[in-house]
Image: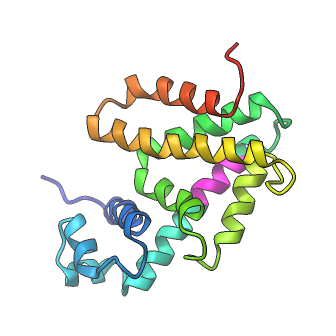
Amino acid sequence: MPRQPRTGVDEKILDAAAALFARHGFEQTSLKSLADAVGLSKAGLLHHFPSKDALFEAAWEQSRVLTMHVLDQVSPLPAGPERDRRALELLTDHALDRPGLVSLLFRTMTAPGEDPQQAQDELLLNEMFVIDPEKELPRAIRIVGALSAMAVLTLLANQEGDKTTWRPLILATCYDALGHQEA
């Protein structure tokens, strides 16, 4: 079997690490569990990332890169159902391809205060869906519900190994959670 390019290995490590950090938090995630998740020894993992802190920062940064990509794609669209649908499509596609990174991004909703950049991440999600949560609480709750459903359903789709069948169902569920009517 050919050796996987370093970037592919690093992407696999970042996604697996992000999933563990999202599930257990930084403090409760050990270097050994990170190494085990990607089939490396601790020394092998440290060859790619010099410390757990560096791995955590790299995972958060990749999560932010995905978020910025989605934001760049939806920003030209006016606020409303079309923009919401496009944001959900892009986030779902990223979640199906990189479930750990998206789980880490959504952790800002479930573990407040874990990351010093969390406020910035929340602002990006608010900008993506064009919302001021303090003024639009019902919509904010719907967005959290849609993103939570997306996180759970994309993880299940990955476990089932049938992303193609699950994708339209995930999108319909999330779009419905936002309160939009299907066309």
Instruction: Give the residue displayed 44% in from the left and 84% down from the top.
Output: 53
- Magenta segment's dominant SS is helix
Q: Which image quarter holds the C terminus?
A: top right
Position of 3 relative to 24 (above/below): above
Instruction: Give the residue displayed 82% in from the left and 40% down from the top.
Output: 76
Image: magenta residue range: 65-72
Is residue 129 visible in the rendered image? The answer is no
List x then y, in percent, for residue 164: 39, 26
Image position of 41 (left or right of 63): left
User: Residue 133 or 34: which is nearer the viewer?
Assistant: 133
User: Residue 101 or 48: which is nearer the viewer?
Assistant: 101
Image position of 179 (left or right of 164): right
List x then y, in percent, for residue 89: 59, 34
Instruction: Give the residue displayed 38% in from the left and 69% down from the top.
Output: 24
Image position of 129 (left or right of 161): right
- Give the quarter of the image for residue 20: bottom left
